[in-house]
Image (cartoon, rainbow, N blue to C red):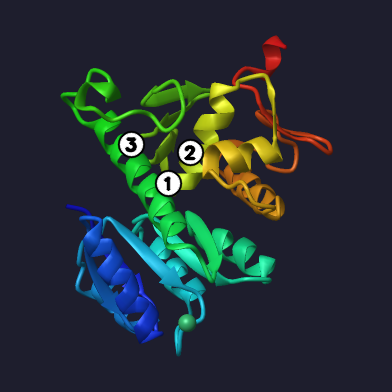
Amino acid sequence: MSRVLVVEDEAHLAQGLRFNLEAEGYSAEIAEDGETATDRLLAKKENFDAIVLDIMLPGKDGFSVVEELRAARNYVPVLVLTARGRPEDVLKGFAAGADDYLAKPFDLSILLARLQGLLRRSEWMRSAHAPEHSSASANGLQSPNTGDFATFSFDGKTIDFGKLELRANDTVVHLTLMESELLRHLIRNDGRVVSRKQILEEVWGLHEDTDTRAIDNFIVRLRRYIESDPAEPRHLLTARGVGYRFLANPETR
Ligand code: CA
């Protein structure tokens, strides 16, 4: 049973969420503020499979919570709840390390679908990494998209999609779930331009008019991880006005 922590200060909404999550077969718990959330997740090291995190909280806000989690190398999938009409919150949330977002007020069925998407991805990643695995579908789990490579190497770097790690020489960089998914999507399309809209739809499963700058934000971070000179990228190229293109072997093109 997946365990979900709902971080939400509006008691009515929090209890409604818990009730509905439990009805869907999740185990759900509530933290009423950011301080309680970081205390349970970091100080007490409680394990949750996903966090539903409101941004507007009394005291420590949702941005700080997700930032603290990532700084402490806690990569639990985080779905943030933003106020409608504040697209800058989406960008800020992604920059802080959130994996997905939903604008308030939201439709309960959409929240459940998003949460399920995050859990399915992280479960798939874990199963792809499990030592006994031969293919991810062997235990009934499908890759969120097509193709289910568990590792990928290029230019002296290896990405382990199961561990959410990028290794280069002696350094190991930990990727968030969505950083890893974006990278995998671009790699799967090696050599082809992928539009920002495609990325939003195929990686995040977002169909509404999301500010595509969220993607650019992720690209900047990925370049820092994979490029020797992020200002002069060789692998993760910009297709001006369209999107991005990954090249594993830039020399051969
Ligand atoms: Ca709130």
Residue sticking out furthest to the bottom? 59
Name the quarter where the C terminus is drawn: top right
Question: Which quadrant holds residue 182?
Answer: top right
Do residues under tags 1 and 3 come within 8 Å of each other at their CB atoms? yes
Q: Along the line of sight, which residue is nearer the eye, 26 or 138?
A: 26
The disc, 1 or 3, on the residue closer to the chain's N-terminal end is 3
Above or below residue 53? Residue 205 is above
Mark 1 in CB contact with mark 2 (< 8 angstroms): yes
Question: Which residue type does callout 2 highlight?
Answer: Glu
- Residue appearing at x 38%, y 34% in the figure: 161
* Residue on which the image places disc 2: 181
Q: Is residue 41 visible?
A: no
Under circle 3, the secondary element is helix
Residue 69 point in image, percent of width and height: 38, 66
Residue 170, quarter of the rendered image: top left
Q: Which residue is mark 3?
A: 125
Q: CA distance from mark 1 to mark 2?
A: 6 Å
Disc 1 is placed on an element classified as helix
Give amino acid for label 1.
Leu
Q: According to the image, label 1 marks what residue?
A: 177
